[in-house]
Amino acid sequence: MFDGLLLLPVGLDWAHASQGWLWLALVASGLYHGVNPGMGWPLAVSAGLMDKSPRALFRALWALAAGHLLATLLVLLPFALLLVLAEWQRSIQLGASLLLIGFGVYRLVERRHPRALARIPPTQLALWSFAVAIAHGAALMLVPIYLGLCQAFELDAGHEAAGALMKASLGMAVLVSLVHVAAMVSAGGCLAWLVYRHLGLRFVSRSWFNLDVIWSTSLILVGVVALGFNLASWH
């Protein structure tokens, strides 16, 4: 009896610690997406310089954030609905990890950018941001983190009715998307403002480097880590 009482706080501490790391990973992924020029912050700089107004820069950032937020919600919400099927939770987590790894391998092999992205006019930044987040797997990268946070929540809350579980899963999907996009806009916005006010376009031309390999590798890495945690939790 005393052993069980001693193990309970240890289990709770481990759950809280793992949840903290997941939130940290969520913020880190947002910062990573924000710093990546492929997610659009140079377009915000361009908008500010063309209109000769910082307001244009911030309007562009809001448009980029709206598109990225919509993309993350579009990807996460189906998984939120699937989590109601509690008996399939393990399969859903493993499937999401394998899907992310597979997409990362595909992006590593197929490095050409989808032609449809080039057809989106620069004035439609929200649509462009949405399409880029889907095409490059930026939204998909959040799925393992989101599923891990939902699992931690369910361990604390216990078995609830399907309606309550769905509501909690949907709420978590919205929260994950908002936290991620807030971190992304903070990082990308800071870089855009520095380039616009102080560093200039020469900084972009000199500092620009191809992140496709790093991006694809990061997708695979996140998927492998998530897969490892899922397999380890079986034992």
Image: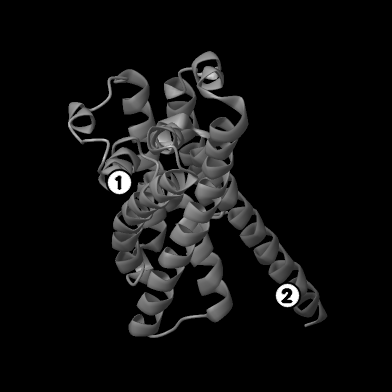
Q: Nearer the viewer, mark 1 or mark 2?
A: 1
Report the amino acid beneath label 1. Phe
Report the amino acid beneath label 2. Leu
- Residue for badge 1: 130
The span from disc 1 to disc 2 (Cα, nearest Å) is 44 Å
Using a 10 Å C-alpha cutoff, classify the residue at mark 1 as few (fewer than 14 neighbours), some (14 to 19) or many (20 or more).
many
- Is 141 in front, or is 39? 39
Q: Quadrant of residue 141?
A: top left
- Is 15 in front, or is 59? 59
Looking at the image, residue 175 lies above or below residue 66: below
Q: Residue 182 location, x and y as percent?
A: 52, 55
- Quadrant containing the N terminus in the rendered view: bottom right
Q: Is residue 152 left or right of residue 175?
A: right
Please identify the residue farthest to the front as the structure is shown: 52
Q: Residue placed at 34% from the left, 26% from the top?
A: 107
Camera sees residue 231? no
Using a 10 Å C-alpha cutoff, classify the residue at mark 2 as few (fewer than 14 neighbours), some (14 to 19) or many (20 or more).
few
Q: Residue placed at 31% from the left, 65% from the top?
A: 82
Which comes sooner in the sequence, label 1 or label 2?
A: 2
Looking at the image, residue 5 lies above or below residue 118: below
- State the mark number for residue 225: none
Q: Quadrant of residue 111?
A: top left
Quick one: SS at disc 1?
Answer: helix
Q: Residue placed at 46% from the left, 81% from the top?
A: 159
- Residue for badge 2: 8
Q: Residue placed at 46% from the left, 30% from the top?
A: 37
